[in-house]
């Protein structure tokens, strides 16, 4: 939720696998074998794209409900690749099912851009890193 501090912990398990925890939830990240991992879980870039896609679907669904736009289903497909000047390029294909006008579709597109993760990625974030002995 926007405005709520998030806390996540990450611990190396084995090879390139990382256990990620947030509250009562836990999941894995890994790298594919071509990068030295075991391919047992999504890589960090896939997790990032998943976070953006989930945020956009949640944001658009919430907006559609409030605006009484007759959305019956929402899907997001995302892709990412290095772009010009070293900037990562993310493509998003948001699909909506329902009796939707062109105006409704444009309103949903604008709502998707108000997703907090979209704001973070498009506006940048300050990352402060400390390294301490365990």
Image (cartoon, rainbow, N blue to C red):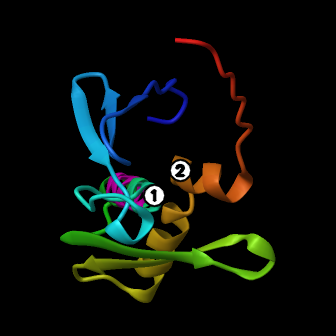
Name, please, the residue furthest toward the top.
134
From the top left corner, tell me how far across and down residue 87 is, in percent: 73, 70
Residue where numbered disc 1 is placed: 52
**Magenta residues, as a range?**
53-62
- In-image side of 38 versus 130 (left or right): left
Q: Is residue 26 above or below residue 97?
A: above
Identify which residue, 91 or 86, lies in the foreground: 86
- Dot 1, how many residues are within 10 Å of its Cα: few (below 14), some (14-19), or many (20+)? many
Dot 2, crowdedness within 10 Å: few (<14), some or many (≥20)?
many
Please tell me whether residue 59 belongs to the stretch shown in magenta.
yes
- Residue 9's quadrant in the figure? top left
In the rendered image, which quarter contains the N terminus?
Answer: top left
Residue denoted by label 2: 117
* Front residue of this view, candidates 24 and 132: 132
Give coordinates of residue 14: x percent, y percent.
30, 40
Disc 2 to disc 1: CB gap under 8 Å? yes
Task: Report the residue at 30% width, 77% height from top.
Answer: 96
Q: Residue at x 20, y 70 (%)?
A: 73
Q: What is the distance, in whole Å, between disc 2 and disc 1 at their CAs?
A: 6 Å
**Relative to 27, 45 lies left or right:** right
Q: How many circles with numbers are drawn on the protein?
A: 2
- Helix, strand or loop at label 1? It is helix
Residue 71 is at least partly visible in this image: no
Q: Earlier in the sequence, mark 2 or mark 1?
A: 1
């Amino acid at each position: 939720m926007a405005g709520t501090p998030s806390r996540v912990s990450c611990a190396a398990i084995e090879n390139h696998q990382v256990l990620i925890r947030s509250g009562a939830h836990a999941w894995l990240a890994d790298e594919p074998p071509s990068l030295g991992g075991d391919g047992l879980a999504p890589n960090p870039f896939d997790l990032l794209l998943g976070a953006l896609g989930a945020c956009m679907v949640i944001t658009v669904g919430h907006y559609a409900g409030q605006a009484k736009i007759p959305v019956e289903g929402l899907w997001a497909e995302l892709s990412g690749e290095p772009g010009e000047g070293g900037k990562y390029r993310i493509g998003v294909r948001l699909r909506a099912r329902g009796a939707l006008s062109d105006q409704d579709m444009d309103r949903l597109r604008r709502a998707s851009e108000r997703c907090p993760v979209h704001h973070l990625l498009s506006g940048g974030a300050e990352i402060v890193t400390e390294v301490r002995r365990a």
